Image (tube, rainbow, N blue to C red):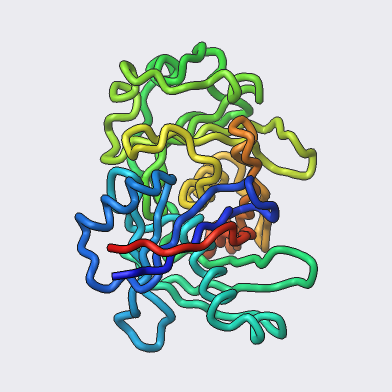
Amino acid sequence: MRRKFYTLDVFTEEALSGNPLAVVRDAQGLDATRMQKIAREFNLSETVFLFPPRDPANTARLRIFTPTRELPFAGHPTVGAAILIAEMDAPELLAREDLQVVLEEEVGDICCTVRHVKGRAPRASFTLPRLPQKAGEASSAAKIAAALGLDVEDIGFEGHEPCLYSAGNPFAFVPLASRDAVARAWPNLSAWGEAFGQMERPAAFLYCRETVKPAHAFHARMFAPGLGVTEDPATGSAVAAFAGVIMAFEPPADGSHGFTIEQGFEMGRPSLITLGLEVEGGVLIEASIGGCAVIVQQGTIDL
């Protein structure tokens, strides 16, 4: 069967930056084994397969695969798929007004708002279907430093300490003292399991206060060799869970707050992810992820 696919660059307004995503439309008839092989063929951090929704009131059902396994939720596939559907299925309407795209993922239904601003790339944002929760206890700074090829002195800043959070996918969050330490980090696979093996899908999100652009809140990198993704240019599901880190170490006052996290700069694929927080009574009651995407190519696969 001939199936149409698209690739997009997500969390960017410029092609050939951001995080690449493959989207296969009309995926009916593909089983998990076949989808996994297709994802391995694309060899991007994630590949999305679109199916008709289980609930006809929704827009589509998504299944998301890394090169090695299926994920229940991921940020850049959600943003990219929502923008692609709006751009392909309702371009005239999108040019006039914001569109609501409801995507069924394993983590739950996700309502995305897609907006088109003349002269700019389309943007999508969505409210997290699940607020971040602590996902266990982090390993020692010494073990984490060894797994990242760093010194113990590189770990931590301003009271931030390594921790584990999940908003659908678990991540180890590793605060680093400087952008230089972030740049020097690289997975040491012989020590990786010792530092992060307490998670089913070991992945580490490194962050520091020092940023490339002064207006941004944090600079980050993400490594997930166990998922077949040595480094990811932009990780929306990690930034979703990062809301828990912010609330743990520097909780903002009640009200609405926005943070821009920059990622992918060390890979030559600058990416910007927007994290929104709604705080009430000192408690996080809602969080959102947003970003832009551009369609780069399209084609067909005969499978």
Determine whether 244 is above or below 27 in the image: above
Q: Is residue 269 left or right of residue 130?
A: right
Residue 23 in the image: state x and y as whole percent: 44, 62
Comparing 259 with 250, the one in front is: 259
Q: Is residue 285 left or right of residue 226?
A: right
Determine whether 135 is above or below 193 in the image: below
> Which residue does the image show at 53% across and 72% down from the upper left?
112
Residue 183 in the image: state x and y as whole percent: 60, 23
Residue 275 in the image: state x and y as whole percent: 61, 54
> Which residue does the image show at 41% across and 64% down from the upper left?
300
Comparing 82 with 248, the one in front is: 82
> Which residue does the image show at 56% across and 69% down from the upper left?
83
Query: Residue 1 sits in which quadrant?
Result: bottom left
Residue 121 in the image: state x and y as whole percent: 70, 63
Comparing 21 with 280, the one in front is: 21
> Which residue does the image show at 63% across and 35% down from the upper left?
268
Determine whether 86 is above or below 24 in the image: below
The quarter of the image holding the C terminus is bottom left
Number of numbered discs overlaid on the protein picture = 0
Query: Residue 45 sits in which quadrant?
Result: top left
Q: Is residue 246 left or right of residue 178?
A: left
Determine whether 242 is above or below 53 in the image: above
